[in-house]
Image (cartoon, grey):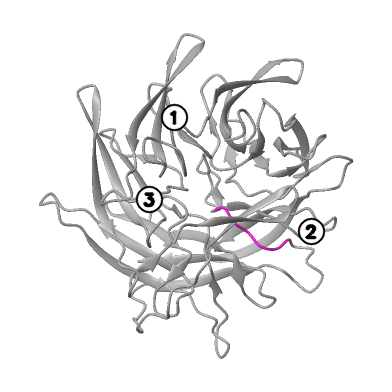
């Protein structure tokens, strides 16, 4: 059954499934999970309901965002400092502290070379359609937010969502899931001097063959070209993988795969990643979901489904993309499925023979008795140099407001 979108308010869009799959047969966890922080204290000052995966700084500390909560209710930017395995939590910024501030930060944060943080909010701003923001810290460790752009909801786009990318010239690239021609945009935000920024729409999706609703954001390749997915549109209406090729100051879109809802799956919502040879990896969410690979061949791309989830004891609904370790194994999260039907952390190991294997590393659970776990992970994972995985859950913990977790395979 297809997925639908439920508006939690007129300006916040949350992805939810219509039906929950039946509970799967019990499966043991084969990796160690540790909850690093339980979000949603009694007054929600820490923030609550995190969606995106956290981000590392150069010292291995974690930075992330919550969609709601904080002092002003618009969500927070938080930091988890690692000291020999002990993690200390602090809130760096509370959205809503200034008039027309952003709210509902549902995209991963990124650092620039100077240690500044960038991200988006899906709501708020001068017009209520979301913002792109920058956080900078002073010598005292205090962080200040600056709104770089406030979306107007028209041709410039509305409701930014998914990964943003920063190029060597300091330009920011991302996507909105609405606006443009109503089906979302790819945008560029360029510094123009004196602290000002200029937004330019590189493409407005039409829900035709070019795609529609790019939830996953964009990824830059080594040549500065942009890659991403749309959850709808394409030749058969099931989404596309797109490439935007830069030629001077202009950009040209090329659809490199159009999903058919057959063996290749449909409705990709997550981001894409590259390996060192230039292969692309991602996920689809419809019909339990799948993990796929795209390989450049001459002037085209070859698509291969690495693993198609069955919906029985497998993960269900991998909303975000995957990460890849040095051995070529792929790791991701699923919103549902697993032993308790509350989501999983999974590993897919591709094989040169063409048959990949999948194993569930962790089954999320309510854990009413014993250590509290999270559940319903909607964001993806990040990987540290030792092979440990980090992510967030949408719910779970003391107050059912989400967690930050670590999984050691």
Say whether residue 165 is magenta: no
Classify mark 2: helix, strand or loop: loop
**Crowding near the residue tagged with mark 1, few <14, some 14–19, many ≥20 C-alpha atoms within 10 Å:** many
Q: Which residue is mark 3?
A: 283
The image shows residue 55 at horizontal and vertical percentages of 55, 48
The tag earlier along the polypeptide, 2 or 3, is 2
Q: Which residue is mark 1?
A: 210
The image shows residue 37 at horizontal and vertical percentages of 62, 68
Between 68 and 201, the one lying in front of the other is: 201
Mark 2 and mark 1: Cα distance apart in space: 39 Å
Q: How many marks?
A: 3
Name of the residue lying farthest toward the right: 99
Position of 172 compared to 147: left or right?
left
The image shows residue 20 at horizontal and vertical percentages of 49, 72
Magenta span: helix, strand or loop, mainly? loop
Mark 3 and mark 1: Cα distance apart in space: 19 Å
**Crowding near the residue tagged with mark 2, few <14, some 14–19, many ≥20 C-alpha atoms within 10 Å:** many
* Residue range (magenta): 47-52
Classify mark 3: helix, strand or loop: strand
Q: Between tags 2 and 1, which lies in front?
A: 1
The image shows residue 23 at horizontal and vertical percentages of 42, 81
Q: Which residue is mark 2?
A: 70
Residue drawn 72% across the image and 33% down it = 153
Q: Between tags 2 and 3, which lies in front?
A: 3
Q: Is residue 327 visible?
A: no
Mark 2 and mark 3: Cα distance apart in space: 32 Å
Q: Is residue 356 visible?
A: yes
**Crowding near the residue tagged with mark 3, few <14, some 14–19, many ≥20 C-alpha atoms within 10 Å:** many
């Amino acid at each position: 059954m297809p997925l639908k979108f439920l508006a939690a308010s007129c300006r916040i869009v949350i992805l939810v499934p219509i039906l929950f799959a039946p509970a799967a047969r019990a499966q043991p966890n084969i990796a160690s999970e540790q909850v690093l922080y339980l979000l949603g204290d009694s007054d929600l000052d820490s923030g609550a309901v995190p969606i995106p995966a956290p981000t590392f700084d150069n010292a291995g500390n974690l930075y992330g965002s919550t969609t709601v909560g904080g002092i002003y209710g618009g969500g927070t930017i938080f930091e988890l400092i690692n000291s020999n395995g002990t993690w200390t939590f602090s809130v760096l910024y509370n959205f809503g502290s200034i008039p027309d501030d952003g709210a509902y930060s549902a995209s991963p944060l990124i650092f620039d070379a100077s240690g500044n943080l960038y991200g988006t909010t899906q709501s708020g701003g001068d017009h209520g359609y979301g913002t792109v923001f920058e956080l900078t810290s002073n010598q005292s460790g205090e962080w200040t937010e600056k709104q770089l752009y406030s979306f107007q909801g028209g041709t410039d786009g509305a409701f930014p969502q998914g990964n943003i990318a920063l190029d060597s010239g300091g330009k920011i690239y991302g996507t909105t899931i609405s606006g443009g021609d109503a089906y979302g945009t790819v945008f560029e935000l360029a510094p123009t001097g004196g602290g000002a920024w200029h937004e330019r729409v590189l493409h407005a999706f039409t829900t035709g063959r070019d795609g529609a609703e790019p939830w996953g954001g964009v990824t830059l390749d080594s040549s500065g070209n942009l890659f991403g997915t749309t959850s709808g549109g394409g030749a058969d209406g099931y989404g596309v993988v797109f490439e935007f090729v830069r030629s001077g100051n202009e950009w040209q879109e090329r659809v490199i795969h159009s999903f058919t809802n057959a063996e290749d799956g449909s409705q990709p919502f997550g981001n894409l990643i590259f390996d060192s040879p230039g292969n692309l990896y991602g996920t689809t969410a419809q019909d339990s979901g799948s993990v796929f690979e795209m390989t450049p061949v001459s002037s085209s791309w070859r698509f291969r489904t690495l693993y198609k989830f069955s919906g029985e004891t497998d993960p269900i609904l991998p909303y975000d993309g995957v990460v890849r370790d040095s051995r070529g194994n792929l790791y991701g999260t699923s919103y549902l499925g697993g032993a308790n039907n509350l989501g999983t952390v999974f590993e897919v190991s591709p094989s040169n023979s063409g048959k990949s294997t999948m194993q569930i590393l962790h089954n999320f659970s309510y854990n009413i008795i014993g250590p509290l776990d999270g559940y319903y992970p909607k964001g993806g994972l990040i990987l540290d140099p030792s092979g440990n995985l980090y992510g967030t859950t949408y719910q779970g913990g003391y107050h059912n407001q989400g967690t930050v977790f670590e999984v050691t395979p």
